[in-house]
Amino acid sequence: MPRVPAERGRLVDRPVAGEKHVLLAAPRGYCAGVDRAVVAVEKALDRFGSPVYVRKQIVHNVHVVSELEKRGAIFVDEVDEVPTGSHLVFSAHGVSPMVVQAAADRQLLAIDATCPLVTKVHREATRFAGQDKHILLIGHTGHEEVEGTMGHAPDRTTLVTSPADADTIEVADPDNLVWISQTTLSVDETMETVRRLRERFPALQDPPSDDICYATQNRQVAIKKVAQDADLVIVVGSANSSNSVRLVEVALEHGARAAHRVDYASEIQQEWLDGVVSVGVTSGASVPEVLVQEVLADLADAGYSTVHEVTTAEEDLMFSLPKELRTDVTGATDDRALGGRTSSGPAVAGTARDGGRP
Ligand code: SF4
């Protein structure tokens, strides 16, 4: 989807019964895994030159992909589309061992930008399969992350796509089950799925820690708080971005009268604003902040120039670059530290590095 240039004045300031304002959720936008993956492609282009191939969208955002294409990245669906000997980046959503092997067979120079929090789920799947457990993976059919995770234990995994699915799935050994999940699901819906699974399979084991990642959880907590006071919620994010789509659902479940997802500000419709006093705004974990600022500029044209930030957590997590990119051409080591933390608190949220990125 091409970016439609900002058309100032497209939205009209119509009177409503109250003082128009925006409730801006924080945290929003780029997470540590997305930041790392996008920087990995940029660094690969800087170091190896164009083209650098990327399997699937590096992150699920049309604008990010389009900007990287302009710099010389080529996005492909599968490894066999990449010329032998080329550089190939695996996306933040991760890949199965079969894909890694296919890249090696083709003598590709692979750079693994899988988010470390997805890699953690891969390791869980491998470990549970090694213990002869059967895995119930809660996730969405066809999502790249789900395909990658299932590929780590293909014979020992059953996909559970929803609470309703939990009521009907069949398993061979109900006393030897463990559940894990995709990282970008609705927390509430996942807990409902687990509850219904456990009703049928009381011996179901929990994973040692949450698989739904900190960024997904934090953005859902923030939009829940915003939604309870919002007539309308606008979520900036792409249609194939699982966590962005979940934000629309969560907003509607927690009080927003209406909620819409947009890739760009130009998609906001005048009629969405009819009678609206309070507009909630947030963005998915793969969305650069510049797109949110364009939404705020358009809303200001429509009279929503007062912006209150609603902050529910502080984020300062950063991941080190993929190991293939950790030294620069002079041999110096990249100084990005692995680790960091997330914490609750009344401070400004959001990763520090996402401000001007495409
Ligand atoms: S949304 Fe979560 S799992 Fe996905 S890239 Fe971001 S931090 Fe990693």
Image (cartoon, helix red, strand yellow):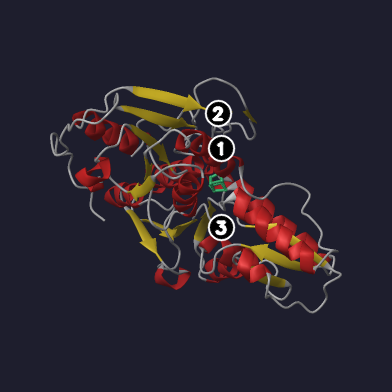
Marks 2 and 1: CB-CB under 8 Å? yes
Q: CA distance from mark 2 to mark 1?
A: 7 Å
Q: Nearer the viewer, residue 214 or 233?
A: 233
Q: Residue at x 47, y 26 (%)?
A: 310
Which of discs 3 and 2 lies nearer the camera? The answer is 2
Q: CA distance from mark 3 to mark 1?
A: 25 Å
The quadrant holding residue 175 is bottom right
- Quadrant for the C terminus in the image: top left
Q: Which residue is mark 1?
A: 221
Q: Position of residue 67 (x, y in %)?
A: 30, 47
Which numbered circle lies on residue 94? 3
Q: Residue at x 78, y 62 (%)?
A: 198
Q: Earlier in the sequence, mark 2 or mark 1?
A: 1
Q: Nearer the viewer, residue 65 or 279?
A: 279
Label 3 is placed on what type of residue? Answer: Gly
Q: Which residue is mark 2?
A: 312
Marks 3 and 2: CB-CB under 8 Å? no
- Give the structural element (helix, strand or loop) at label 2: loop
- Give the structural element (helix, strand or loop) at label 3: loop
